[in-house]
Amino acid sequence: MPSSTGASLRVATWNVEWLDGREGRGIRPRTSSDFAELAAVVSGVEADVWSFQEVLDETAVRRLVGPDWTVYVESRRADQRVAMAVRPGLSATFDEVEDISVGRSGLRRGVVATVDGVDIMGIHLKAGCAWDPLDQGSDCETVGRQFQEVEEWLDGRSGTAVVIGDWNRQLTGRDDGWSGLNDGTPVPLVAPLLDAPDDCPGSRHRHPIDHVVVRGIPESGVQARQVRDSASSDHCPVVVDLTR
């Protein structure tokens, strides 16, 4: 595991599918064994920072990370929210980026954790445009606006920045969303799972829709992988090691 006190940081993301922390409750009810399996996957990754999507509240997140982590959950009232969790021993500040929801109350905001000098924004973009051009239909046009907001946020950072989460889009080198993001201004971006096959069991996608995009670190300093264990979720975690 990378040292949090040096120049390395491990960040992970997981859409945990309608996670309600109460056993047998919610849209996707879980048993005690379900919670144990989810928590075991999180523990096994040994991340410094987690971005979670589709969590109900802090109670749900703590079923995954335990009582000692620092947890921040999106303040928007909803059953599906974005959260960030930072492991014990690391200090963090948090913020929300409302612009990611492009003025629509039903869409998730970005949640930012600043840890060890790195701005990490967890996102969960709109579904419905996993592959089509971003100017094709209302869903894709909305996703295109969200990509523009992500780009503006990245362009506004002065140091190392990470956007990680459920992009709901298969990023490839041919994707117009990626070409818009990575226009080289002010600096090139790194997306380590770009063009990768989706290795999550049961996935209906050719390429992952959960991604990490990094600004301010060369490609050689960014190593990512998809964890092939979905437990009781319909997504698999993505883990990235950042070496500065």
Image (cartoon, helix red, strand yellow):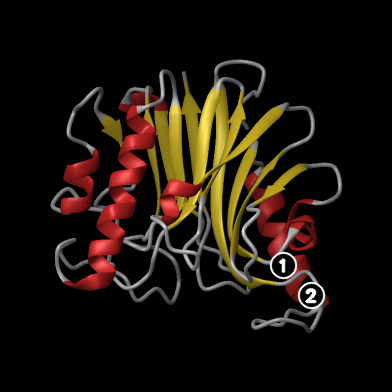
Classify residue 2 by image quadrant. top right
Above or below residue 187? Residue 170 is below
Residue 193, image x, y percentages = 33, 47
50 left or right of 219 in image: right
| Of residues 188 and 4, the one drawn nearer to the viewer in this rendering | 188
- Disc on res. 33: 2
Residue lying at 71% horizontally and 50% vertically, measured from the top left: 43
Compute the Cα span from label 2 to label 1. Answer: 6 Å
Secondary element under disc 1, as helix, strand or loop, is helix
78 left or right of 88 in image: left
Above or below residue 29? Residue 126 is above
Does residue 166 appear in this view?
A: no
Q: In which quarter of the image is the N terminus?
A: top right
| Of residues 40 and 117, the one drawn nearer to the viewer in this rendering | 117
Disc 2 marks a residue whose amino acid type is Ser
Residue lying at 65% horizontally and 24% vertically, measured from the top left: 4
Classify residue 188 by image quadrant. top left
Classify residue 201 by image quadrant. bottom left
Residue 48, image x, y percentages = 65, 36
Q: Which residue lies furthest to the top in this view?
A: 6
Above or below residue 170? Residue 43 is above
Residue lying at 48% horizontally and 29% vertically, measured from the top left: 242
Residue underneath mark 1: 37
- Disc on res. 244: none
Secondary element under disc 2, as helix, strand or loop, is helix
Q: Do the residues labelled 2 and 1 touch (CB within 8 Å)?
A: yes
Residue 135, image x, y percentages = 14, 63
Disc 1 marks a residue whose amino acid type is Glu
